[in-house]
């Protein structure tokens, strides 16, 4: 029996509270909303679910607390077909959570509280050592401590796997982490910060940012929302993926959908360009899907 390639996500799990209103409040302003609901989140959890939906054998290494939020997140991973044997239950911290406020255009702003995600480290990786040895691609984000990401990346590379870093939220990357990354994926804001380029608003601007970042990484991907996706492959060739035009219902989770589909496609051995095209189309489909139907 041929098994699908293994995609392992090491990273964050958040209990999300989504709030819907006419606009996002300004400083000191109170806005009357229309609805709210809980949902499973955290970039790590979302990306693992996306990879599973895209056909990968997806596994999650993470941490939640022994609380209602943690049980909610574990139930979601179970339902979505993600191996969660290596999501630990921590004491002394609450499960990570976030509040996202959506406006009428489907855009949002969010605040996260990392909680148990900050506990991730050597103990969790030791427990998952057998899983890491069979992992084709390890996916990381910036919602857990940098030192934990470095250790996870080192172990995946030692076992022969590829390391994909979604450098989100934006923060400086340590040299130790950069040295382990095979595929860097950033959005426009993160690309601006890490590359020192001007505001990335066009596909050409995204390509320019990718070129600035390329010397530090084998492959670089810059997502520019409605402007498309730009990348530089391992041979230094430019890749430009035009945007898929859709009616925006909600941008929430689009980046995580992109990452999960990209990782699943690369794990299957697809070219970077083909994987990016699949990820771009999947993210566009999600953006066009109302939150209530996801």
Image: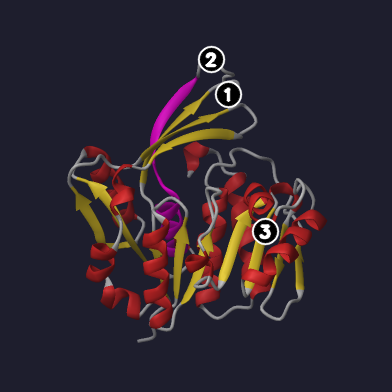
Q: Nearer the viewer, residue 246 or 220?
A: 220
| Relative to 40, 187 lies left or right | right
N-terminal-most mark, 1 or 2: 1
Q: Position of residue 9 (x, y in %)?
A: 40, 63
Quadrant of res 230: bottom right
The magenta stretch spans which residues?
A: 34-52
Quadrant of res 122: bottom left
- Residue at label 2? 31
N-terminal-most mark, 3 or 1: 1
Q: Residues within 10 Å of mark 3 (few under 14, many from 20)?
A: many
* Relative height, residue 187 to residue 38 (above, below): below
- Residue at label 3? 222
Q: Secondary structure at mark 3?
A: strand
* Residue 39 within the segment the image draws in magenta: yes
Tell me whether the residue at label 1 lies in contact with that at label 2, contact meaning CB atoms closer than 8 angstroms: yes
The mark closer to the camera, 3 or 2, is 3
Tell me whether the residue at label 3 lies in contact with that at label 2, contact meaning CB atoms closer than 8 angstroms: no
Q: Position of residue 201 (x, y in %)?
A: 77, 47
| Relative to 128, 262 lies left or right | right
Write the residue at 39% across / 85% down.
Answer: 2
Q: Secondary structure at mark 2?
A: loop
Q: Secondary structure at mark 1?
A: loop
| Relative to 68, 18 lies left or right | right
- Residue at label 1? 24
The span from disc 3 to disc 1 (Cα, nearest Å) is 26 Å
Q: Position of residue 247 (x, y in %)?
A: 69, 41
The mark closer to the camera, 3 or 1, is 3
Write the residue at 55% across / 81% down.
Answer: 269
Q: Position of residue 289 (x, y in %)?
A: 57, 43
């Amino acid at each position: 029996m041929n098994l699908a390639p293994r995609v392992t996500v090491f990273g964050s799990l958040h209990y999300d509270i989504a709030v819907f209103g006419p606009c996002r409040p300004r400083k000191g302003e109170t806005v009357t909303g229309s609805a709210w609901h809980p949902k499973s989140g955290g970039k790590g959890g979302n990306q693992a679910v996306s990879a599973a939906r895209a056909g990968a054998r997806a596994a999650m290494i993470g941490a939640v607390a022994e609380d209602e939020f943690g049980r909610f997140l574990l139930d979601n991973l179970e339902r979505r077909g993600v191996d969660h044997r290596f999501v630990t239950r921590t004491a002394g911290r609450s499960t990570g959570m976030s509040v996202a406020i959506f406006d009428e255009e489907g855009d949002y702003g969010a605040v996260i509280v990392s909680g148990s995600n900050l506990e991730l480290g050597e103990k969790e990786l030791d427990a998952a050592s057998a899983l890491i040895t069979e992992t084709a691609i390890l996916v990381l984000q910036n919602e857990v401590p940098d030192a934990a990401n470095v250790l996870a990346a080192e172990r995946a590379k030692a076992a022969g796997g590829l390391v994909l870093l979604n450098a989100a939220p934006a923060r400086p990357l340590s040299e130790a982490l950069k040295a382990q990354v095979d595929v860097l994926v950033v959005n426009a804001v993160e690309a601006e910060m890490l590359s020192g380029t001007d505001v990335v608003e066009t596909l050409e601007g995204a390509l320019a940012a990718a070129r600035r970042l390329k010397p530090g990484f084998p492959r670089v991907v810059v997502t520019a929302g409605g402007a498309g996706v730009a990348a530089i492959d391992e041979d230094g060739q430019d890749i430009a993926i035009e945007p898929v035009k859709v009616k925006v219902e909600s941008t929430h989770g689009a980046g995580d959908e992109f990452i999960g589909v990209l990782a699943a496609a690369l794990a299957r051995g697809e070219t970077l360009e083909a994987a990016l095209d699949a990820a771009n189309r999947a993210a566009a489909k999600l953006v066009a899907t109302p939150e209530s139907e996801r």
